[in-house]
Amino acid sequence: MAFPYLQQPSFLLASLKADSINKPFAQRCQDLVKVIEDFPAKELHAIFPWLVESIFGSLDGVLLGWNLRCLQGRVSPVEYSIAMEFLDPGGPMMKLVYKLQAEDYKFEFPVSYLPGPVKASIQERVLPDSPLYHNKVQFPPAGGLGLNLALNPFEYYMFFFALSLITQKPLSGTLHVRTSDCAYFILVDRYLSWFLPTEGNVLPPLSSSLGGTSPSPAPRTPAMPFASYGLHHTSLLKRHISHQTSVNADPASHEIWRSETLLQVFVEMWLHHYSLEMYQKMQSPHAKLEVLHYRLSVSSALHGPAQPSLQALHAYQESFTPTEEHVLVVRLLLKHLHAFSNSLKPEQVSPSAHSHATSPLEEFKRAAIPRFVQQKLYLFLQHCFGHWPLDASFRAVLEMWLSYLQPWRYAPEKQAQSSDGQARCVSERWAPFVQENLLMYTKLFVGFLSRALRTDLVSPKNALMVFRVAKVFAQPNLAEMIQKGEQLFLEPELVIPHRQHRFFTAPTFTGSFLSSWPPAVTDTSFKVKSHVYSLEGQDCKYTPMFGPEVRTLVLRLAQLITQAKQTAKSISDQYGESAAGRPFLSWLGFYPSDTNSSYSTNDLDEMGQDSVRKTDEYLEKALEYLGQMFRLSEAQLAQLTLALGTTQDENGKKQLPDCIVGEDGLILTPLGRYQVINGLRRFEIEYQGDSELQPIRSYEIPGLVRVLFRLSSAINHRFADQMVALCSRADFLGSFCRYHLMEPTLSSRHLLSPVGQGRSAGCVRGPRLSLRFLGSYRTLLSLLLAFFVASLFCIGPVPCALLLVLGYFLYAMAMALLTERGKLHQL
């Protein structure tokens, strides 16, 4: 594509829009590369917003863009390679970003598409706590439609890139796409590796190679300096938008402003989501007081009427449910951040290193997780634990959580495996991380327990999740570190004046990014208390992980694990018995089938014996790990088994659900209701009424069953006396007639309810003929199959029918004799 430089930007934009419709994808990308190289920033400025939207899709999700979340190399190799080369951190698109960055262009981004908490805060005319928004909020002009953010090109590009994970919904036919193979997932990994390097420094912008002006270092200027955060998190205290102030950043920080911006954008767009209740909880009294004071003291004519807090909260009541793909991308971010933070040299990790001159990147590595990620990740995980469905898809959230809890897995030095094959011991080096993330370990573990107690542990996928959590927490020395952290938090607090409201202290908005590092806090107990209060508030009620309440939950989980193990074994045995013990004649329709079974199959049956074995292994190891963590003895576990009543009865079958006998029959206890809901136990429900009047089954022909019922009723009415006389005989003919004309009495059946026992006495029916078995598809198919096989041996229909009658007559004689002898033995 060749455009003369005298063309207007509007014509350039119109030409590119036309080409996006008429030209193939590869040709469009080649033209874009040439445009980026040939045109100056003044003309590229007009096409930049359209180009970003055409790549990542519109913020409302209507335009799909390049559909990076479904673009895979093995499915579309040409389009995939072109897109990845164009969007690479060193590719043409980032060259365009840096070219525009050098001219200090700004682009408007609507506030209405920001995450719910941020949008609600800005709509209240209150500035969010993240430095990402400082000096960027623009009030609408007279007659304007909404608030906007004034973003530089790099921020604008990253906002769209990060939000496309949430706003763009995958197509219905692409649900099977593997997230880790998609272009979007791989681009996230490349951006993280480029801007948050684990080795070396951040590469400089590439615009200098274009022959243009190098990017201005000013974009970092509006952001809050690291020193203003203090050593710990600030609260969600909001400052009014009118208080936005500028910061004269230290020039030494300019080399990593892109790294800081990338991390803040990813955290804000992906993690700053939680429920309305959490939003209200995180509004501190001091923050509310400041907002109220502003509204009373500042004239509304200057800034327009502030939106009432109640309206803002009402506007925020939109629900947010992260997808599994969203969680997988967040996990990728956390794993890379651990590797990024752990790439500090050993001499730089110690607190004494803070006083020495260190590079901005090293300072950023030390501050990335505790100051930008920890609080929002905790709220995000709490939201997922409380709102995610109780199914196997929770595995994605679980693995994301466990990845954050194990930074030692991403350290450059690998811990040595013990000689006896036991799990690796967690080094004492990680004790500060465990203590400063105490709630991530303890409160979320309690949240997982509450979920595990409500899931069906017989399912292999659910059993695997319990096993994974138990295995991680049972790593040697980890439980001791958590217990030490709890002791530090629960120890009596000395009277220190500045402690009580430290969480609610307003952040300062002046100072340099590389201002002197705050003096190290030597009071470890204060560090832990500050962490807990910053996430839960000063009035939080902490439940110790190794206290009696959580121990009770663990014992309940151990009970259910034991129950689930025996249930899986029982289902496996029952399935094997039913498959092996079914008579061959029942498949031909000559054996009475069991029409009373209410549970024909189980999910575990369909998965096979291998899944039963895996479930048993997962639950066995999980029980072992829980016993190690909470010091459960073998005697305690045996007691739990007896308390649950998991022993089998004399027939080897499971007992009834836990219940008590009331005046009107059996009443389920809370434990019994849990057992029924999760399929751990069940009542063997049987049809106790007239077998001729039971509902028509799916394997029966409705019209034929009704005709056969009328015919049987007519015969029974016409020959009732003769049938009674025949069945009263004491010879072989009487036994033969009783076998065919008499059905078992209700008194000989297994009645589950005491109520039915009183009614069974009067339910005695006389001899009668039943032809309903002829209305079964299986019976008719068996007869047709028999006639077809007979025709292969040159046997006609009539001789075949006579042979079938003779064969059944011999079978019935044998069954009649055996039945009569069985009755004599019972007498």
Image: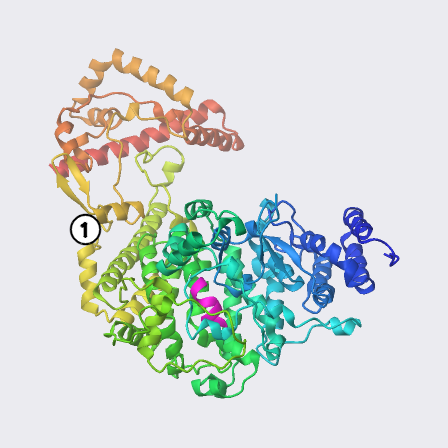
146 vs 289: above or below? above
Percent across and percent down for residue 678 are 32, 48
Report the number of discs: 1
Indicate the position of residue 303 as horizontal and vertical percent values: 53, 51
- How dense is the environment of label 1, judged by Cα within 10 Å: few (below 14), some, or many (20 and up)? few
* Magenta run includes residue 369: yes
| Main SS of residues in magenta | helix
Task: Identify the amino acid type marked 1.
Answer: Glu
Residue 745 place in picture, x, y as percent = 19, 29
Residue 116 higher or lower than 209, as above or below: above
For the N terminus, which image quadrant? bottom right
Q: Nearer the viewer, residue 626 or 497?
A: 497
Task: Answer left or right for 675 relative to 802.
Answer: left
Residue 446 in view in this figure = yes
Q: Which residues are magenta?
A: 368-376
Instruction: Name the residue: 41% across, 72% down.
Output: 232
Q: Nearer the viewer, residue 725 or 187?
A: 187
Residue 143, relative to residue 155: is it above or below?
Answer: above
Residue furthest to the top in view is 718
Drawn side of residue 407 relative to residue 466, left or right: right
Q: Is residue 220 left or right of residue 459?
A: right
Secondary structure beneath label 1:
loop
- Residue 463: horizontal and vertical position, in percent? 37, 59
* Quarter of image, res 810: top left
Is residue 283 among the parts visible in the rendering?
no
Q: Is residue 60 magenta?
A: no
Instruction: Tell me which corner region of the image, top left, top right, bottom left or bottom right, holds residue 479.
Output: bottom left
- The residue drawn where x is 30% and y is 65% is 623
Image position of 732 (left or right of 525): left
For the C terminus, the image quarter is top left
Which residue position holds label 1? 650
